[in-house]
Amino acid sequence: MGWFGIDLFEAIRGRRSVRRYLDKPVEEEKVLRCLYAAHWAPSAHNSQPWSFVVVRGPETRRRLAEVHRWGRFMAEAPVVVAVVGDPGLSSFWREDLGAAVENMLLAAYAQGLGSCWMGVAGTEYEEPIKRILGIPGGLRVLCMVSLGYPAEKPTRGRQPLKSKVHWEKYGVQRDFEEPRFPS
């Protein structure tokens, strides 16, 4: 099972957004594994238009939390990662970074960490976050990701898959049995 020792589908089904964290530092090796997983995401034309700003300092995390209305918990999360895109490298930078973020979230879960992504691009939070982190003008902040040991276990489920699947044409649905995975 390698680094993570967890089944892929277990990680996909088990991962949830965590907004409360234990007051416990996250080992640098675990943070680097999350970044490594993000870095191996697919991207259009292999452009890899991402970079990551890792924030551990409590004062900077506090300032970020004050800026982002929905990210107040960044002040308590031991690690916050700004996911930065370069639109000059790919016109699909948002999609590319989205794939990288999902890899990061799954890698965090597989290592026993909680995580939560908070959207930034195109919001009033983007410019203040760029100033706080010294991100150059031509780059964009897609989102912030908090990482830490979870102090909660959210259990939100999903709507049935068959309500989201259309066959051959939108609006054509049929009944089917959802796949079963180990729990």
Image: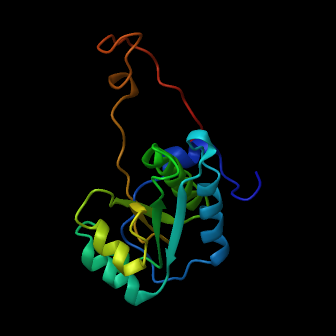
2 and 47: which is toward the camera: 47
Report how many numbered discs are placed on residues in the image.
0
**Where 42 sits versus 84, above or below?**
above
> In the drawing, does residue 97 fall left or right of residue 112?
left
Q: In the image, what residue occupies the spot 30% across and 77% down?
A: 65
Residue 27, image x, y percentages = 62, 78
Please tell me whether residue 1 is drawn above or below residue 120 in the rendered image.
above
Residue located at (54% from left, 54% from top): 49
Q: Residue at x 77, y 55 (%)?
A: 2
The picture quadrant where one finds residue 143 is bottom left
Q: Is residue 90 left or right of residue 67?
A: right
Q: Position of residue 166 (x, y in %)?
A: 37, 17
Look at 45% across and 78% down and name the residue there: 22
Rendered position, 103 above or below 56: above
Instruction: Report whether residue 71 is seen.
Output: no
x and y percentages locating residue 157 in the rendered image = 36, 43
Query: Visible in this render: residue 3?
Result: yes
Vertically, is 65 above or below 174? Answer: below
- Quadrant position of the C terminus in the picture: top right
